[in-house]
Image (spheres, grey):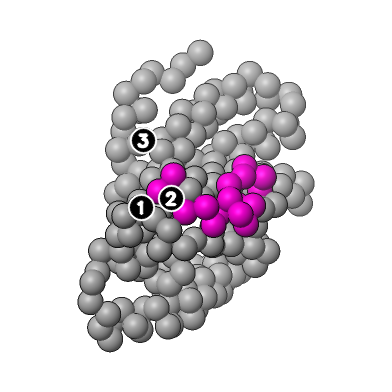
Amino acid sequence: MLDYAIGLVASFCAVAIVLTLHEFSHAYVAYRCGDPTPKWNGRLSLNPMRHFDLIGLVCFALVGFGWAKPVPINPYNFKKYKRGLFLTASAGILMNYLTAFLFYPLYRLVVLLFFRIGDVVVLGSFLRQWAYFLFAYSLSFAVFNLLPLNPLDGFRIVDALNRRRGKVYRFLRDYGHWILLALVAESFLCEIFVQAGVGIMDNFNLLGWIMKFAVGILGWPITSLWGLIPWKI
């Protein structure tokens, strides 16, 4: 019970940092591209409370997938419409990948130090899980937002690059959020069955398969590069 509580607190603390950096990067890039809307709405801030969406936060902390409040923008304020829209949409994904790259060595260092402070069980367990969640959530949030489903960043990138507004585009725009909620709910139910001992349900976790595949590919350069360092004290 204590381990679960420590993990849950560590998860929420990591989510607060990951989501805040993601949304702040959207707001900052939009502002730099000429749109003052994020600043007017108080989103040009590193205060986590400005960015939280309660349901998205709970989903993220419990199942590793979630979302924050979208940063309001007015793309018609951009100095260059398409360029500003693309850069703003991409900013959060790039920020999360960069922080994943920086948080991974922090996690490795904490793991090493944990053995030196093994007598402080609660502190060591919290720091180890917190540092791992910082890396894992940064990477998974970057991958999650690449999905071309409205209102995720992947759809905004498609919107910026695609001049046609065909049936597929309209379907993703109008029903993307329902598809997203269905995928998260299906993943959550599969996790419940797995935790209950029905391991075969892990094979039906659609979002889980997508995330494992993509995270494995995008995470490999990070772990491989930092793996070249001999992590010993």
Q: Residue at 55% across / 70% down in the picture?
A: 188
Left or right: 149, with 47 as reference point: left
Q: Residue furthest top?
A: 233
Mark 1 surroundings within 10 Å by alpha-carbon count, few (fewer than 14), some (14 through 19), many (20 or more)? few
> Is 97 colored magenta in this rendering?
no
The residue wearing badge 3 is 223
Q: Earlier in the sequence, mark 1 or mark 2?
A: 2
Mark in front: 3 vs 2: 2
Circle 3 Cα neighbour tier, 10 Å, few/some/many (<14 / 14–19 / ≥20): some
**N-term-proximal mark, 1 vs 3:** 1
The residue segment tinted magenta is 32-48
Q: Position of residue 109 (x, y in %)?
A: 52, 24
Element under disc 2? loop
Q: Give the secondary structure at mark 3.
A: helix
Residue in the image at 63% along x and 18% along y: 116
Q: Residue 82: x, y in percent?
A: 30, 59
Residue 86 appears in the figure: no
> Seen from this angle, which residue lies furthest bottom?
167
* Left or right: residue 136 compared with residue 118: left
Residue labelled with disc 2 = 34
Residue 135 place in picture, x, y as percent: 49, 41
Q: Is residue 88 above or below residue 134?
A: below
